Image: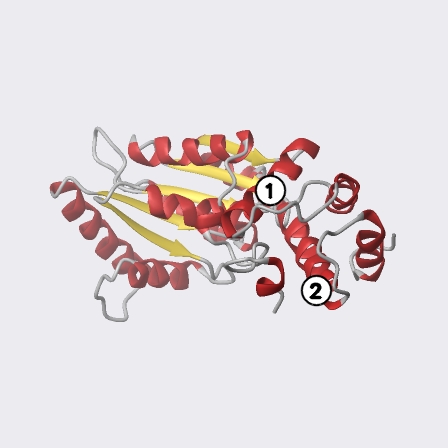
């Protein structure tokens, strides 16, 4: 709606996790590099956690674009499942044909697939987003999947991505064996103030035709106070501000307009 008014090629603050907008902050780069390394070196288990809106899913989508071409991937996003349903979803994501069978048989089918991929020198990665929703029983099943290995290397690399509740769940005594298999755990903290400003400028630079300064320094400060460096909240309030600026015929968002936008947000009472 406001793109032409501001000379934008597209909306810079969409809420979808588009890898094109990946912002290479120190913490996001470290998380991404850790994932690429762990999968490429067949290290087994990796856990990435962060608060809601911290950028986990964007990192996940960026990871899928950067993995080596010989890496087979399955991305699971429905985590309100039991152990057998999870196995079926994994087989579906890897395009493995199977008939209705017991959980043990489904695991054997997956194992055969993994051995075949190893013979082709292909790596296999299973990425589970929103993993905090998995029950302890299903997490234990994932540990069983991670046991599929040769004498020398893991047959499947597993990435669990989720909110901080995932870490609390992994500390349960019954999940001790799973916890011991985690090679890398990286927690995504919010962006600091400078990173938040750079994040906004990064998105605007990718979408702008004219390189204009869309927000005053005072407005940027208010954005940071509102969002506390959470990328999703930055996107939400910046998009609302540009829409309000368009509606009021204001080319540059200043602190006055930003206060108005924040005061109208259901997430904050300014």
Q: Position of residue 184 (x, y in %)?
A: 46, 30
For the point 85% across and 52% down, which residue is it? 256
For the point 42% across and 32% down, which residue is it? 33
Above or below, 68 against 238 in this view is above
State left or right for residue 262 relative to residue 126.
Answer: right
Residue 190 seen anywhere in this rendered image of the structure: no
Rounded to the nearest angstrom, the CA distance separating label 2 from label 1 is 19 Å
Residue under numbered circle 2 = 246
For the point 23% across and 54% down, which residue is it? 108
Residue under numbered circle 1 = 201
In-front residue for pair 139/66: 66
Q: In which quarter of the image is the N terminus?
A: bottom right
Residue 37 seen anywhere in this rendered image of the structure: yes
Q: Where is residue 57 in the image (x, y as percent from the top left)?
A: 50, 50
The colour style of the image is secondary structure
Q: Using a 10 Å C-alpha cutoff, classify the residue at mark 1 as few (fewer than 14 neighbours), some (14 to 19) or many (20 or more).
A: some
Q: Using a 10 Å C-alpha cutoff, classify the residue at mark 2 as few (fewer than 14 neighbours), some (14 to 19) or many (20 or more).
A: some
Q: Where is residue 81 in the image (x, y as percent from the top left)?
A: 47, 62
SS class of the residue under badge 2? helix
State left or right for residue 106 relative to residue 6.
Answer: left
For the point 73% across and 60% down, which residue is it? 245
Above or below, 246 against 238 in this view is below
């Amino acid at each position: 709606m406001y793109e032409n008014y501001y000379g934008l090629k597209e909306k810079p603050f969409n809420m979808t996790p588009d890898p094109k907008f990946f912002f290479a902050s120190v913490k996001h780069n470290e998380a991404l590099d850790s994932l690429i390394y762990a999968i490429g070196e067949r290290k087994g288990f990796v856990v990435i956690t962060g608060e809601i809106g911290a950028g986990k899913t964007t990192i996940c989508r960026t990871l899928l674009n950067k993995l080596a071409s010989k890496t087979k991937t399955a991305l699971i996003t429905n985590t309100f499942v039991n152990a057998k349903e999870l196995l079926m979803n994994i087989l579906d994501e890897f395009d493995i044909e199977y008939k209705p069978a017991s959980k043990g048989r489904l695991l054997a089918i997956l194992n055969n697939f993994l051995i075949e991929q190893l013979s082709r020198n292909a790596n296999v990665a299973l990425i589970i987003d929103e993993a905090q929703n998995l029950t302890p029983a299903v997490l234990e099943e994932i540990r069983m999947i991670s046991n599929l290995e040769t004498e020398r290397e893991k047959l499947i690399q597993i990435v669990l991505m989720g909110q901080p509740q995932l870490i609390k769940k992994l500390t349960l005594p019954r999940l001790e064996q799973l916890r011991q298999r985690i090679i890398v755990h990286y927690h995504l903290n919010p962006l600091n103030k400078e990173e938040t400003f750079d994040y906004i400028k990064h998105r605007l630079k990718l979408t702008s035709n004219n390189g204009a300064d869309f927000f005053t320094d005072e407005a940027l400060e208010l954005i940071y106070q509102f969002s506390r460096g959470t990328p999703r909240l930055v996107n939400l309030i910046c998009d609302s501000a540009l829409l309000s600026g368009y509606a009021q015929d204001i080319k540059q968002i200043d602190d006055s307009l930003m206060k108005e936008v924040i005061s109208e947000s259901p997430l904050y009472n300014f």
